[in-house]
Amino acid sequence: MRSTRPLAAFLATVPLLAGTGSAEADSESASADVMVGERVVTVRAEEVAPGLFFITGAGGNMGLSIGDDGVFLVDDQYAPLTDAIRQVIAKLTDQPVKFVLNTHWHGDHTGGNENLGASGTVVIAHDNVRSRMSAEQFESFWDRTTPASAPEALPVVTFSDAVTFHMNGLSIRAFHVAAAHTDGDTIVQFQEANVVHMGDVLFHYWYPYIDVSAGGSVRGTIAAVNAVLSMIDAQTVVMPGHGATVTDKAGLENYRDMLQDVADRIQSMIDAGKSLEEVQAARPTAAWDEEWGQHFMTPELFTKLIYGDLSGGL
Ligand SMILES: [Zn+2]
């Protein structure tokens, strides 16, 4: 059909396209590549609201606010990525990174703290993030020990409940949710922009890891998601800690429904005295596996995680 379209009709549309431009066309993006071992990692920032960006790379997804008051960053991935993250931010603003807020203690969200702190960034987190980073941690699910972080990597400002940053024309409200992915999770709400960063309380279309050894739980994760759902609307942009794209209220509801259904099924089998092997054989996640079970947390592993959490066996 396009080939038969009169040239004059096509030309008539050109000034319109050039002259207006939708919000989509105005949104910015920036990226930078970095070698991590043998692998090329692309750090990429996509604008999701004016001055607000969703950044992917390796490790936990970041959030970024830029403006006249400086740069506010949610999480900082791994130390080898700091230069690439700085390059991406420098393509968007000439302001320094004033604050980084860690959503929880895991190294794929806090690995850049020491580098950023050395150049004057103030690192902020919940009290439990600093205390867990200050001591060796053992995650029984992965049989993994993480040494204490260097003192220079620790958050220098901590809070117990909530803190609000007033900058770049926004109220950036960071609030603690108890016993969710860990015992130190923070949700970050960019209020006037209607954007929320969930940290690892949300894995978008991956079965989530829940760090039960660090005080996390599936019931607490569901409660935290429900709390956020009560605060947002159909237009809210929802950033997940893991997963390639942002989502929305409907995506968050779908995640909650999956967690609730899997937890309820496994709980009833625990109540009936079933062993882990019997529960895994019954495939309590089957209805959700195609959408959620295609990443590192396989259906079998996720069943083991939720069984261990709900039976007190982790
Ligand atoms: Zn995590």
Image (cartoon, helix red, strand yellow):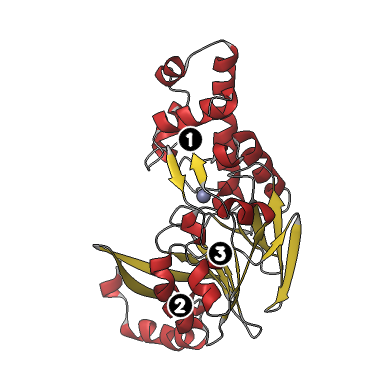
Give the mark nearest the N terminus, 3 or 2. 2
The numbered disc on residue 182 is none
The single residue placed furthest to the top in the displayed view is 272
Q: Amino acid at mark 1?
A: Ser
Q: Is mark 3 within 8 Å of ligand 1?
A: no
Q: Is mark 1 within 8 Å of ligand 1?
A: no
Find residue 155 and report its horizontal and vertical position in percent. 61, 64
The answer to whether one can see residue 236 in this image is yes
Which residue is at 52% across, 61% downward?
Answer: 110
Q: Which residue is mark 1?
A: 140
Packing grade of label 3 (10 A; few <14, some 14-19, many >=20) is few
Q: Which residue is mark 3?
A: 151
Q: Is residue 221 left or right of residue 247?
A: right
SS at badge 2: helix
Check if mark 2's residue and mark 1's residue have beta carbons within 8 Å: no
Which residue is at 58% across, 42% downward?
Answer: 214
Packing grade of label 1 (10 A; few <14, some 14-19, many >=20) is some
**Position of 283 relative to 64 (above/below):** above
Q: Quadrant of residue 15?
A: bottom left
The total number of labels drawn is 3
Q: Is mark 2 within 8 Å of ligand 1?
A: no
Give the mark nearest the N terminus, 3 or 1. 1
Which residue is at 74% across, 55% downward?
Answer: 160
The numbered disc on residue 86 is 2
Q: Amino acid at mark 3?
A: Pro
Q: Amino acid at mark 2?
A: Arg
SS at badge 3: helix
Which residue is at 37% across, 40% downward?
Answer: 294
Separation of disc 2 and disc 1 at Cα?
A: 34 Å
**Position of 284 relative to 296 (above/below):** above
SS at badge 1: loop
